[in-house]
Amino acid sequence: MAPHGNQNEHEHARDSEGTGERPEPVIRDNRKVDPVTGQARHPEQDGAAERPDHEDIRPVDEAHDSGDALAQAEQILSEAAAGEEVAAHDAVIAELRNDLLRLQAEYVNYRRRVDRDRAVAGEVAVMGVLNSLLPVLDDIDAARAHGDLTDGPFASIAAKLESVLASQGLERIDAAGVEFDPNVHEALIQQPGEGIDVDTVQQVLRTGYRTKARVLRAAQVIVATPQG
């Protein structure tokens, strides 16, 4: 006599064949990593919690879960690549800005140096012209001292020449009775003087000239010294 359990199985099979229906397949999730929590599964715990065969088991859409994970991975990689691209662009912008600031500073220094050199070159040129005209001015002073330039066309020419040179910054050093200054005076003769406390210019033998920048020629003078 067959066991009671086998008889039930045969009857269940006959009923299924008579109705033409197939039993639903049972799907078991054997993945080692939980797709929801991301934690590792323990086979011994899954076996202990395994449901009986007759209970309904919900199918797992493995392809859908894999697609979500791939999409998340692609999104993470895309964000990382975007962050690296932004950082690279910022680094390039910072480098270009530093180069621009350096070039601007170099240009400013270049302009200052050019302006300074141009001013010095112009000053040297003016001084060269003034130095070359000093003998002419000495002749004009000698003619004026002899009374040859009191009137006439030569007196007018001399006055115009002195006016032009004065407009270029030329100054005469010809004052008497002032304190002797070795920077602008050249003492040819020294003699005791009365009523003075310091060395004093007593007489100018040859006029000196200077500009605001430097002395072109020191004045040759006679110096009176205080009496001991």
Image: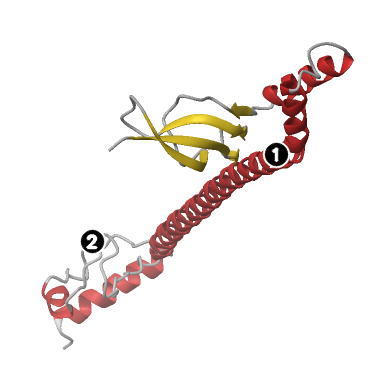
Side of 1 relative to 88 (left or right): left
Q: Amino acid at mark 1?
A: Gly
Q: Does the rendering let one see residue 212?
A: yes
Distance (Cα) linking label 1 and label 2:
85 Å
Q: Nearer the viewer, residue 194 or 65?
A: 194
Structure colour scheme: secondary structure
Q: Dot 2 surroundings within 10 Å: few (below 14), some, or many (20 or more)? A: few
Disc 1 residue crowd, few under 14, some 14–19, many 20+, Cα 10 Å? few
- x and y percentages locating residue 78 in the rendered image: 47, 57
* Secondary structure state at the residue bearing disc 2: loop
Location of the N terminus (image quadrant)? bottom left
Comparing labels 1 and 2, the label whose residue is closer to the camera: 1
Closest to the observer, 33 or 140:
140
Element type where label 1 sits in the image: helix
Q: Earlier in the sequence, mark 1 or mark 2?
A: 2
Measuring from the top left, give residue 206's x and y in whole percent: 63, 35
Residue at x 15%, y 77% (from the top left corner): 47
Question: Residue 33, image x and y in percent?
Answer: 27, 71
Left or right of 190: which side holds 194?
left
- Does residue 136 appear left or right of residue 9 in this picture? right
Q: Vertical placement of 110 versus 14: above or below?
A: above
Task: Identify the residue at image location x=57%, y=39%.
Answer: 218
The kind of residue on which mark 2 rests is Thr
Residue extending farthest to the bottom is: 1
Position in image of residue 165 (x %, y %): 72, 26
Question: On residue 122, which mark appears?
Answer: 1
Q: Quadrant of the C terminus?
A: top left
To which quarter of the image does residue 46 belong? bottom left
Q: Which mark is residue 37?
A: 2
Residue 74 shown left or right of residue 140 in the figure: left
